[in-house]
Image: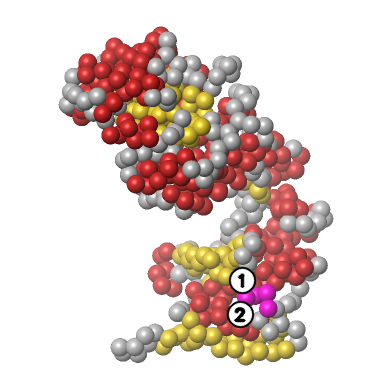
């Protein structure tokens, strides 16, 4: 394993290459918010976009130049292209946009695949080299530092290695601080890529690497390039990017710091990885992947009873690192695969003493029976806590439901009306309330809320934020058993409850009832 070089760059391109992901569109405020998070994480370079190519990126660089997000750790980079065929860099408008961006560093993309030069640029191989030399030397003369991205380098090397290497040599001799070898199509595998990087090192250039994930090897390819001698790695947070995405920068940095033992970021920055990863996901409106290495919700989640038994002895027996090193947590899942150890560990996480083996075994059997009927507690921690409280005799009765019914009516040429009536007793008073909504679940929610408000005003803050239905026995058609998951928020935290039944309204009612009960329990306990 290679030792850490004297100089090594962590280069983030979330705001440029990551923003090319299908369905992802970043406004200027979005980009400013992400830039602040990236700087907080401690990356060395932030590629902000392509000034002059679109109004948003131009406005972003203007805002950064005006000091809207002062950078403490990172250096801002503007992305661009070599000057046009047959022109001069000094007269090229997009080259001028790089200079006018006031970014300290320009990263320009250059063709390094001979067929792309001849068929995409429609020029000669010599003119392409002249374009690189002219653009790099002009930007350097104007006071900018320059990196060069060699587009399609690895594919180009396989077809014409001499020319691909000449592009690297030309960029370096023109003044590029780093020449970045790009696996633009994402088709490389680690052993192949490492060999090519080794050949490129013979040019004497300072090398970087930029990998896409089309073979599922973007992070592995990046590490292979590091082992082969690059001193600059590019990637995106959460692996955002075109097609299957770019190399996930979080995984790259975590592997280099925790597995290689290198110190790349400011002290303790890596412990913020999970928080920052999820914060960026909130800004992009792309749900975080639960199975993302290091920072995913499931990264340190354990389901099998065998795992739980070992973890009770030593948590590291089934974990490759301490989750706290990346700001994550171990989670014990409760399911039909659970053993007594799972239940005991999960109960302890929730604040319940399940050291009594008989009690733990009884609850384990109860969970397995419920899971066999279609319940899922690994997705509904709130319902699992309520099950624990029932079995332990610790479930307070904030309210009791005497009856409920839902009535939906549709007449010709009129809107469908849904009405719900509930009878609830809370704090010794009985309330019969009618609620209306745009569907049965909405009407139920309104009715329960109105019935509970006189006794518990806090329910005004409860809000249903997600509702999911899954058919459990597909062969039964409309007579199938369904599982309903409801996620509720009080503005500060969210919780999920589950209901199961052949009647989707009844299953929804069960999940909704538990959502209000759980919310009241934790609101009251927080007030003590």
Toward the viewer: 500 or 177? 177
Which x, y percent locates residue 313? 76, 39
Which x, y percent locates residue 387? 69, 65
SS of the residue under disc 2: helix
Residue, x 36% and y 28% (percent of image)? 108
| In magenta segment, residue 188 | no
**Quarter containing the C terminus:** bottom right
Question: In the image, 282: left or right of 163?
Answer: right
Residue, x 17% and y 26% (percent of image)? 122
Toward the viewer: 353 or 125? 125
- Write the start and end of the magenta stretch as one range: 457-461
In the image, residue 58 above or below residue 378: above
In the image, residue 231 above or below residue 279: above
The image quadrant of residue 37 is top right
Residue, x 74% and y 60% (percent of image)? 362
Q: Main secondary structure of the magenta part?
A: helix
* Residue 1 visible to an observer of this rendering: no
Badge 2: few (under 14), some or many (20 or more) residues near its Cα, within 10 Å?
many
Which x, y percent locates residue 495? 62, 62
In the image, residue 205 above or below residue 448: above
What residue sits right under mark 1 in the picture? 462
The image quadrant of residue 71 is top right
Question: In the image, 9: left or right of 190?
Answer: right
The image quadrant of residue 458 is bottom right
Q: Indicate how the structure is coloured in the image.
A: secondary structure
Q: Are marks 1 and 2 in contact (CB under 8 Å)?
A: yes
SS of the residue under disc 1: loop
Label disc, if present, on residue 449 of the rendered structure: 2
């Amino acid at each position: 394993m290679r030792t850490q070089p004297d100089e090594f760059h962590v280069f983030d391109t979330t705001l440029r290459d990551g923003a090319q992901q299908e369905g992802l569109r970043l406004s200027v405020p979005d980009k400013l918010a992400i830039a602040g998070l990236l700087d907080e994480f401690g990356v060395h370079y932030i590629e902000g976009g392509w000034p002059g190519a679109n109004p948003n990126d131009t406005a972003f660089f203007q805002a950064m130049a005006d000091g809207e997000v002062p950078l403490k750790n990172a250096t801002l980079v503007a992305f661009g292209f070599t000057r046009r065929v047959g022109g001069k860099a000094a007269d090229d408008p997009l080259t001028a946009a790089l200079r006018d961006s006031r970014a300290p560093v320009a990263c320009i993309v250059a063709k390094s695949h001979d067929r792309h030069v001849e068929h995409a640029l429609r020029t000669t191989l010599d003119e392409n080299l002249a374009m690189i030399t002219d653009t790099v030397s002009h930007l350097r003369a104007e006071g900018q530092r320059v990196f060069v991205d060699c587009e399609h380098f690895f594919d180009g090397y396989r077809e014409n290695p001499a020319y691909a290497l000449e592009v690297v040599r030309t960029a370096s001799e023109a003044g590029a601080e780093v020449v970045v070898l790009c696996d633009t199509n994402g088709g490389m595998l680690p052993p192949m890529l490492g060999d090519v990087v080794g050949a490129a090192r013979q040019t004497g250039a300072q090398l970087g690497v930029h990998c896409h994930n089309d073979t599922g090897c973007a992070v592995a390819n990046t590490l292979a390039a590091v082992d082969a001698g690059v001193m600059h790695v590019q990637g995106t947070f959460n692996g955002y990017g075109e097609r299957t995405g770019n190399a996930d920068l979080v995984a790259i940095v975590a592997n280099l710091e925790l597995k290689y033992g290198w110190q790349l970021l400011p002290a303790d920055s890596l412990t913020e990885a999970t928080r920052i990863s999820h914060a960026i996901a909130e800004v992009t409106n792309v749900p975080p992947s639960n199975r993302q290495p290091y920072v995913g919700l499931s990264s340190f989640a354990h389901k099998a009873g065998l795992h739980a038994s070992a973890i009770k002895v030593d948590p590291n027996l089934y974990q490759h690192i301490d989750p706290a090193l990346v700001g994550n947590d171990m989670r014990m899942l409760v399911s039909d695969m659970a053993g007594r150890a799972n239940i005991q560990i999960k109960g302890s996480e929730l604040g319940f003493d399940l050291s009594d083996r008989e009690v733990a075994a009884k609850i384990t059997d109860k969970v397995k029976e419920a899971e066999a009927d279609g319940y899922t507690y690994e997705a509904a921690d709130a319902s699992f806590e309520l099950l624990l409280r029932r079995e332990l005799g610790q479930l307070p009765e904030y309210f009791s439901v005497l009856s409920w019914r839902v009535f939906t009516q549709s007449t010709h040429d009129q809107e469908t009306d849904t009405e719900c009536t509930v009878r609830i007793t809370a704090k010794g008073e009985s309330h019969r309330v009618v609620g209306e909504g745009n569907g049965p679940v909405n009407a139920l929610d309104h009715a329960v809320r109105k019935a509970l408000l006189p006794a518990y005003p806090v329910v005004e803050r409860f809000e249903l934020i997600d509702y999911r239905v899954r058919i459990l026995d597909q062969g039964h058609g409309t007579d199938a058993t369904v599982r309903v998951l409801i996620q509720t928020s009080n503005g500060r935290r969210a919780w999920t409850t589950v209901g199961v039944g052949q009647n989707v309204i009844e299953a929804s009612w069960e999940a909704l009832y538990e959502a209000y009960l759980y919310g009241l329990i934790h609101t009251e306990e927080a007030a003590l």
